[in-house]
Image: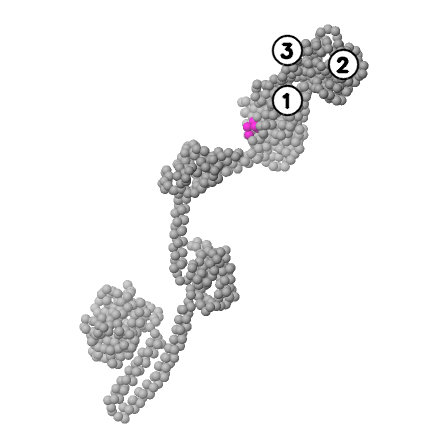
Amino acid sequence: MGQRRAASPATLTTWCSVTTPASENRTTQPHTTSRRSPRTSSKNYWTTLVCCERRVERSRVSRCRPSDSFGRTLGPISHAIIRLVSGPLLTLSILFAYCYSISKTMDFAAETVRVLHVDDNPDLVDVTATVLEHEDGRLCVETATSVDAAMERLSVERFDCIVSDYDMPDQNGIEFLEAVREGHGDLPFILYTGKGSEEIASDAISAGVTDYLQKGSGTEQYKLLANRICNAVDASRSRRELDERTRRLESLISSLPGMAYRRLNTPGWQMETVEGEIESLTGYTAADFETGETAWADDVLHPEDCDRIWETVQDALAAQGEFEVTYRIITADGTKKWMWEHGHRVPGPADEPDILEGFITDMTDLRERERKLERYKRMVNTMPESACIYDTEGRFDLVNQYLASFYGTTRDELEGESSSLLPKIRSEYEGDPYQDLIDGERDELHGEVSGEFPGHGYEVLEYRLTPLVIDGTVEGVVGVTREVTEQRKHEMEIARQRSILKAQQEAVIDGILVVDEDDTIVSYNERFVDMWDIPRDIVERGDEEIALEWAMEQVAEPEAFRVDVEALYEDPETTARDELELADGRVFDRYTAPVVAEDGTRFGRLWAFRDITDLTEQKRELARQNERLEEFIRVVSHDLQNPLQVARSRLMLAHEECDSAHLDSLDNALQRMNDIADDVLRLAREGVDIGVTEPVDLREMSDAAWTIVADGDEAAELRYAADENREWIVEADSDRLSGLFENLFGNAIEHGGPGVTVSVGLLDDRTGFYVSDDGPGIPIDKGEKVFEAGYSTAEDGTGFGLRIARQIAEVHGWEIHVTDSEDGGARFEITGVEFSE
């Protein structure tokens, strides 16, 4: 900060000059008493302050008007101060104290003047005292007949003036004067002597005498002495009061955050005199301005503001003689500041420019506060929430734009109206919660209300009310309200979806665990807790690392398990499935995948565990069964076929050696055994699983199967139901479908005998097809039994044909049933078949 420049005595004198005593020849007014109390002006202090300007003009003491006067009047500074007081820039108490001090000391004419008359002639001092008090009622004259007595009284009493003789026995008047000056400073001292000479007068003046007067015998000399006393005292009081006011004003100016000035009203605005915080305000010294090295308009005022401010000031001066402006300056170090200035014109001689006197202060902080306040107002008025201040009666005192829009009106129209929200809030509490806020019994009131609101229908509002406390007093209530209708609906929908998801999660047989991107467990189901036997506090705590440590203790290979898990976390896009073997022998199917939103945002990783211990055991058992089946196939295909082959060879030799009916029966038995072995081998090796399906024609498949099965039976006949308008194309495995027809046709020829007629057609309800014959049919009580493995009503049947036919139908997703045909034979209906369009 720059050094504050104190106001010069000359400048301060000009600002606070007051009425001083008249010349020696003034006519004193008689008073009825020797002492009067000071008069207190009936005008207010501001008027007193401004009136000082007029009193200065009437001042007749030339020494109170130095030639280097900063300004001839108190007006500029008083007006500026008054302007400043209206803002946040100065404390009122400073000004009131200063103005009050001026009002108390403006008028000396009514005050008592205590005089100490010292003379070694007792009769003379008594006469002089009596005459002086008669001449001027303000005078109260005390006497002393020696210097010692006078000095003693001066040590304990206060006097306004000393009148002393020169020729006294113990000390003369000059020596007395020197003693007074040493102990009592500039106390007025009049040398009143009958022994006059130029030498005595010269010595008295050198010693600092206030006045010098020779004694005389006429009354005129007493009148002159009284006049000299009053003039000396008034002048002394004026000087003392002037010094005191100078000190006070200097303190006042030093307290003002700115600078006072006197400058020419010319485009450059050259400063003549500046006082106050010049350097801290501008970065320049007072000398920089007063010497002309720095010009206010050219070097300090912001270039963009120069023309505007000049025009504004000139227009204001022309209209009312004073002005008030705000503008920017650029300080010596390049800092930009905002200034507030008030000044007025002091007319100069006709051939010289006018003088401007005024005050400038820094309002950068104020502008910044105003700017922040404006930004805050904009923020409050653009926020999508209702904000307001209620008065103590519950009326809107101040509202933001959103609240006004909610009510369908303007802010001005709404302010002063009653709130429709407060009655709804009050209705939900016992007593009056709003009054509790006003009375200071509540610190806050918050919650939700719902209901019908004018122009909006049903709404849910979230509110918060707090007391507005200023200087310890509740002056209203601050309210903020949000419309949360859609939000509450959305929250309810989310809660519903979460409930459904949780129910689904708990309904599945898998253990579910969801970990977010921060490795925190965010979801799990009870099945997961049960499968891993993990303490509930671990999953509730949400620490995935602790849960992983627990799981490692459960698995058969802990380190491999950790490596797999960490690798999956490092690759957030990976989906994987494998099996985990636990230390207790259980086996889990483990599936993991990233949790990804539709926009690609990742939310973590899902882990699903299914206990497949039983399934694994079934697979192992199936593997063992398959091994036994392979052994069975080996036995049938090799160990059984070889003896059969030997038996057939022996039978052939037997036929060559002899002719016996028993040999034919033996041949049939061996053939039957060979057929059974072939069927069992085919069923064991091929099963009935289907391969690739494709569109196939039922008639083509039937024809191919019939050619194989009916070979050697010229009397047997295959017919198709006449239906030229329907498609016979189905989706099937052609090999397995051919096997189905072969087994059904073989069953018809086997049981229907030579010349059997077999029919193939489509069902009327378009759900499948049928194969029927005109053979003996199947008893009703044997309908489903015919599909059992090994069951046959024919003496030479294996009992596997229809069983294989059903299995082929079922693996295609079809069903097969047996009923009577129209010709009395058997009819096999295959349903659930989808035909190609």
Residue 683 is left or right of residue 40, and the answer is left
Residue 26 pos. (x, y %): 67, 11
Q: Which residue is mark 1?
A: 16
Residue 469's label in the rendered image is none
Name the amino acid type tagged 3. Thr
Q: Which of the image's four quarters has the N terminus?
A: top right
Residue 330 pos. (x, y %): 60, 34
Of callouts 1 and 3, the N-terminal one: 1
Real-space CA distance between mark 1 and mark 3, rounded to the nearest whole angstrom: 32 Å
Residue 145's label in the rendered image is 2
Q: Which of the image's four quarters has the C terminus?
A: bottom left
Residue 623 is left or right of residue 568, and the answer is left
Q: Residue at x 42, y 68 (%)?
A: 613
Element on which disc 3 rests = loop
Q: Which residue is mark 3?
A: 32
**Pointer 3 local density, CA inside 10 Å: few below 14, some 14–19, many at least 20:** few
